[in-house]
């Protein structure tokens, strides 16, 4: 990390909750981890809205991996 490092934005998506599954709700968010894209598509919409971030993590991501990739470099640089 250099002194000219920019702000990086990471996003993590959770799975549907138990109540959401009971209500038969559908997943409206798709995480494309290799491209950093989040696709949001409501039922009935043909084209999803696409948002791009520096890092994208889905509900299968390990907490330790997220920490190592996002927080640790900042902590290491500061200390």
Image (cartoon, helix red, strand yellow):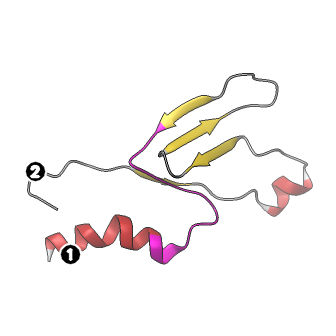
| Residue that extends furthest to the front in the rendered view of this protein | 34
Q: Is residue 76 left or right of residue 14?
A: left
Q: Secondary structure at mark 2?
A: loop
Identify the mark at residue 37; answer none if there is no mark: none
Q: Residue at (70%, 59%) from the top-left corner?
A: 15
Mark positioned earlier in the residue sequence (1 or 2): 2
Q: Residue at (64%, 35%) from the top-left corner?
A: 40
Q: Is residue 33 left or right of residue 21?
A: left
Q: Is residue 73 left or right of residue 64?
A: left
- Measure the alpha-carbon separation of dots 1 and 2: 15 Å
Indicate the position of residue 26 as horizontal and vertical percent values. Answer: 82, 44
- Residue density around tag 1, few if under 14, some if 14–19, many if 20 or more, within 10 Å: few
* Span colored in magenta: 52-65
Indicate the position of residue 2 as horizontal and vertical percent values. Answer: 11, 59
Indicate the position of residue 51 as horizontal and vertical percent values. Answer: 50, 35
Q: Secondary structure at mark 1?
A: helix
Q: Which residue is mark 2?
A: 4
Q: Residue at (51%, 41%) from the top-left corner?
A: 37
Magenta residue check for 53: yes
Indicate the position of residue 72 as horizontal and vertical percent values. Answer: 30, 73
Q: Which residue is mark 1?
A: 76
Q: In which image quadrant can residue 30 be found? A: top right
Magenta residue check for 20: no
- Residue density around tag 2, few if under 14, some if 14–19, many if 20 or more, within 10 Å: few
Are the residues at dot 1 and dot 2 in contact (C-beta closer than 8 Å)? no
Q: Residue at (24%, 73%) from the top-left corner?
A: 75
């Amino acid at each position: 990390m250099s002194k000219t490092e920019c702000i990086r934005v990471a996003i993590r998506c959770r799975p549907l909750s138990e109540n959401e599954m009971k209500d038969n709700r559908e997943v409206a968010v798709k995480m494309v981890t290799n491209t950093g894209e989040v696709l949001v598509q409501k039922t009935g919409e043909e084209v999803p809205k696409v948002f791009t971030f520096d890092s994208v993590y889905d509900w299968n991501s390990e907490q330790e991996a997220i920490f190592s990739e996002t927080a640790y470099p900042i902590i290491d640089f500061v200390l």
